[in-house]
Structure formats: C-alpha cells, structure tokens
Amino acid sequence: MATSWGGGPFLKKDAEGFANYVEQLTAGRIKIQVFPGGTLGKALKVSDTVKSNVAQIGHTWMGYDWGIDKTTVIFANMAGGLNPEELIIWLYEGGGAQLASEYRREVFGVESIPCGIFPTEIFLHSKKRIQTLADFQGLKMRTAGAWAEIAGNLGASTVILPGSEVYPALERGVIDATEWSSPSVNLPS
C-alpha cells in the first residue's frame, strides 16, 4: 500500500489499521504491506502510483489529485466543507460513496472506497496574524487542493507539502502558515 503519510502522522496509523482489518476479514488470506509516503512513488501522487501498478492499493486524501481534476474536492472534503456527520450521511445515505467510486474509476482509473472521516479541519495555523483577507497578501502558506487555488487568488504564495514536512517547514521559516488537517492529525506523533 502506497500512502501519502510519512512515518509520524496519525494518518499512517489509519492506513495500518485498514491493512490489519482487511487481514482479519479475510482470515489472513490478504495481507497488505503499508509503505510510508514517498517510498513507492511521490507522496502526493498515490493515485498515479496505484494506476501504474507500482502499488496495488493506496491510502491518500483525494484532494491531492486537485491538479488532475478539480471535481475531486467534492469527495475529498476540506476546511470549510461538510462536517463529519454531513459527510457520512451524504456518503452512505445520499449515494456519495457510489458516486465517488464511479468518478474515481472514470477520471483516475482507480477504485476508491471511503476509508476514514476526520473532524472538521482547523483552517489555519500561522506565525503571522490573519484577521482580514488582505492579510493573505504575501503569506507563504502550505495548503493543498481547493485551498491552494483560493489562497493564491487572495495573494498568498502557496506550496503543497506532504504532511510529514509541514511542521518542520513552519519551524524553519520556509512557510508562514499551514492549512493541514484536523486537531488529531495536527498533534505531534
């Protein structure tokens, strides 16, 4: 399994949990070896790694595929998107999971199943005070998906980094701010 997650983030534990669950459900007939982000292919290009059959399965956030097709954010969710309850209802009662599967197969050439839902994201951690939209001017910001385009349109200089590189980049001053996941993922590992 190719993942977008380095050795530390909580999300790598989710990928390992999925692999363990599959092994249990198949009475050990299917075993999934989980590789840290960047091992089998680019950490933010897991869909490509799976499509090219370098890995048979991947664990990623669909929003990283924004550059291929912007529609992906509907299924990926993001800061300012649906809350977890709304997303679960849409996926399982509103047909969202089936629609996502059909979309991912048609546009990306991969199968897709929901593999976890996180709490609503904290929008921004910043070393600079952000009070108005004008404060985005010149801000060096790590983000991904739709927010990369939105922040860029507001004047921020955006960079997309894998999760394992976010806080080191913030500490070293490479970026001023980051939009990266939910509180449980933001905690140090």
Image (cartoon, grey):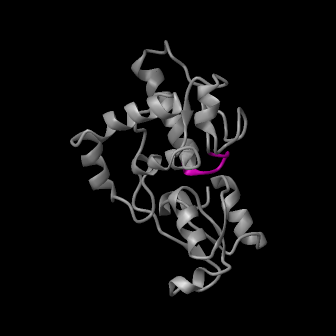
Choose between 151 and 62: the one closer to the eye. Answer: 151
Outermost residue, top direction?
Answer: 29
Q: Is residue 37 above or below residue 129?
A: above
User: How far from the left and from the top, in percent, is residue 132?
Assistant: 51, 86
Task: State the residue at coordinates (40%, 50%).
Answer: 74
User: How far from the left and from the top, in percent, is residue 14?
Assistant: 50, 41
Total tally of numbered discs in the picture: 0
Tell me the quarter of the image containing the C terminus.
bottom right
Outermost residue, left direction?
Answer: 93
Query: Which residues, given as a range, are shown in magenta?
Result: 5-10
Question: Residue 23 lies in magenta, yes or no?
Answer: no
Task: State the residue at coordinates (54%, 72%).
Answer: 124
Task: State the residue at coordinates (58%, 85%).
Answer: 135
Q: Relative to 120, is 134 on the left or the right? A: right
**Quarter of the figure with residue 98:** top left
Q: Is residue 52 above or below residue 2?
A: above
Q: Relative to 31, is 38 on the left or the right? A: right
Choose between 159 and 11: the one closer to the eye. Answer: 159
Choose between 71 and 135: the one closer to the eye. Answer: 71
Q: Relative to 186, is 99 on the left or the right? A: left
Main secondary structure found in the magenta portion: loop
User: How far from the left and from the top, in percent, is residue 57?
Assistant: 55, 27
Q: Relative to 41, is 113 on the left or the right? A: left
Q: Is residue 114 above or below residue 56?
A: below
Task: State the residue at coordinates (27%, 54%).
Answer: 86
**Quarter of the figure with residue 54:** top right
**Quarter of the figure with residue 7:** top right
User: How far from the left and from the top, in percent, is residue 167?
Assistant: 68, 64
